[in-house]
Image: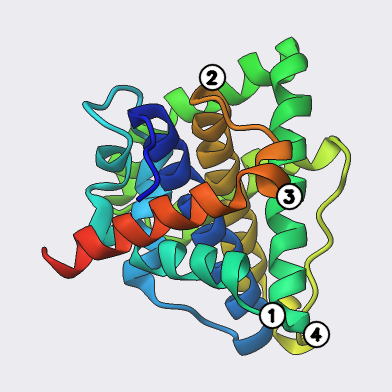
Amino acid sequence: MIRYTDQERDRTIALAAVMQAVHLVHIIANEGSANPAAILPLLNSLLVTEADSTETVYGGLEHLDLGLEQLHIQLVKTKTKHQITQIQYAVNLLRLERKLSKADSMMSSLTREIDQLPQHIEYFDNIEHPQVIARLADIYKRTISNLTPFIQVYGEEHHLEKTSNAHLIRALLLAGIRSAIIWNQKGGRYWQFLYQSKKITAITDDLRSELSQI
């Protein structure tokens, strides 16, 4: 049995949220739609400024079932072309978060935009309203997309050309950045993928076991 700290548990949860975001991006880009129940907790996480625990940022661990599954697959299974694409998205989100943390002006602008979201959502009465998703996409486009590495999303052209899909993909990438920020705040570092993969796998499996008992 591998021992781990609360901080290591928290950053694994945040990493699972990143994986859930990029998996949904990949599904939308290739299939044209994704499960709204998996999308909603990620979008809602953008509005959470204070939480009792990392999982409550997402409304509970049960809302990250997909992300925990994808993280497990990335850690223990032979990667397919699709899985390689998703881990590239995830790594680039983590890299972008590091760039963002050093760009004070952009971080201030992003924080200001996020702070204004509740008023926008109240007007449309739903964070999943197309106009709110478009607003989130615009925030991403005017901030994060100006940093490098630029995330190029691959998929079926007819899905990617659909405006609503493009907006939702950017909104999910913005939510992925939010989770990457939490991951970093909890001590997340790139080298952990190489040297602590066994521990991350063990924590992921424990979290999935917790879910099976809910």
Dot 1 falls on a residue whose secondary structure is loop
Residue occupied by mark 1: 78
Identify the amino acid type marked 2. Arg
Q: Nearer the viewer, residue 141 or 64?
A: 64
Q: Earlier in the sequence, mark 1 or mark 2?
A: 1
Q: CA distance from mark 3 to mark 4?
A: 24 Å
Q: Earlier in the sequence, mark 1 or mark 4?
A: 1
Quarter residue 73 falls in: bottom right
Q: Are marks 1 and 3 in contact (CB under 8 Å)?
A: no
Residue occupied by mark 3: 91
Identify the amino acid type marked 3. Val
Residue occupied by mark 4: 157
Q: Earlier in the sequence, mark 3 or mark 4?
A: 3
Identify the amino acid type marked 4. Glu
Dot 2 falls on a residue whose secondary structure is helix
Residue occupied by mark 2: 112
Q: CA distance from mark 3 to mark 2?
A: 26 Å
Residue 57 in the image: x percent, y percent? 31, 38
Q: Nearer the viewer, mark 1 or mark 2?
A: 1
Q: Earlier in the sequence, mark 3 or mark 2?
A: 3
Q: Residue at x 63, y 14 (%)?
A: 108
Q: Quadrant of the C terminus?
A: bottom left
